[in-house]
Amino acid sequence: LYDATKLMTKDMGGDPNKKEKGPSPTRQQRMFYERIISVVNKADLRSTFEPVRRYEIKNYNYIKSGWLLHDMTLNKARHLRCEWYEEHSRWESNLDQLTFAHIMASGELERKFVLDEPDDNVLAAMPKETDAHEWHELLDEGEAAEYEREHYKRKSLEDDVENHEELEDTLEDGEKDSTVRFCARVVSGDVIREERKLWTHIQNSRNKQKKAKK
C-alpha cells in the first residue's frame, strides 16, 4: 500500500519522495487503511469455524480516476459515487484513487458476508483464466441492513429454524431469485487500450459504409 500510494502521488503530478512536516492527510489515510488490514485480517480474532474473509486492497482496485464511466440512472451507481465522495471528504487528501480502492475493498468484504459467498481460501483455489477479477458486485440497497437484522437481532433459535425451513420450501417449489445484480468494473490500462482499438476499428468500418452508400 505504501508503494501504491507513492505511484498514485506521482500520477497526480506530486513528488512521492517529498517529506512533509507533520502527518499529511495522505499519510494518515494510508496508515488508517493499513491498520484495518492488520486488525480485520488477524487470525487470532477469528473463530476456527468462521469463514475466512479478508479486507484486501488489491492491485486491480487501483484506478486512474480520469477514466470513469457512470450510469447515473442506476441507484447503485449514484450510491457508489456518493460513498466514494463521503469517504474521500473525510481525509482532505488528493488521492481519490486510494479512497476508491478502500471503498471497493470494504464493499467486497461486506458483500461476502451478506451474500454468504465462499471464503477466501476456497476462492483462491478456483481457476482465474477469466476477467472475473474486474467485476465487483454491488450490494442492493437494504441488503446490508437486512443482513444485520437477521444476524444480530434474532428473536429466537426457533425463528431461525422456521425461516430456514421456509427458504427450503421456496427453493423446492422451483422459485428463484430474479434480482438483477449490478457490478462496478475496474479494468487495466491494457484492456482499455485494446477496447479503444476495437471501438476505433468499428467506427472506421461504419464511416466507410456510410461513404460507400453516398
Image (spheres, rainbow, N blue to C red):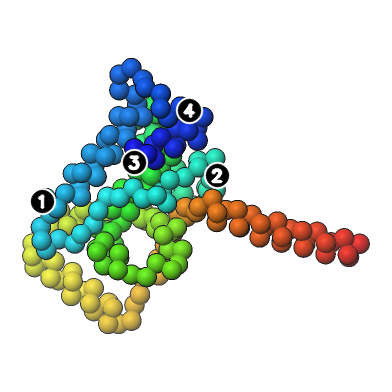
From the image, tell me which residue sits under label 2: 67
- First in sequence: mark 1 or mark 2? 1
**Residue 36 horizontal side relative to residue 62, left or right:** left
From the image, tell me which residue sits under label 4: 14
From the image, tell me which residue sits under label 1: 44
From the image, tell me which residue sits under label 3: 1
Query: Compared to 162, does 39 lie above or below?
Result: above
Q: CA distance from mark 4 to mark 3?
A: 17 Å
Residue projecting furthest to the top: 21
Asked if disc 4 and disc 3 are in contact, CB closer than 8 Å, the reply is: no
Within 10 Å of disc 3 (Cα), the crowding (few <14, some 14-19, many 20+) is some
Frontmost of labels 4 and 1 is 4
- First in sequence: mark 4 or mark 3? 3
Q: In terms of depth relative to the viewer, which is nearer, 173 or 74?
A: 74
What residue type is disc 1 on? Asp
- First in sequence: mark 3 or mark 1? 3
- First in sequence: mark 4 or mark 1? 4
Within 10 Å of disc 2 (Cα), the crowding (few <14, some 14-19, many 20+) is few
Q: CA distance from mark 4 to mark 1?
A: 39 Å
The residue at 33%/54% (across/down) is 108
Frontmost of labels 3 and 1 is 3
The residue at 17%/57% (across/down) is 151
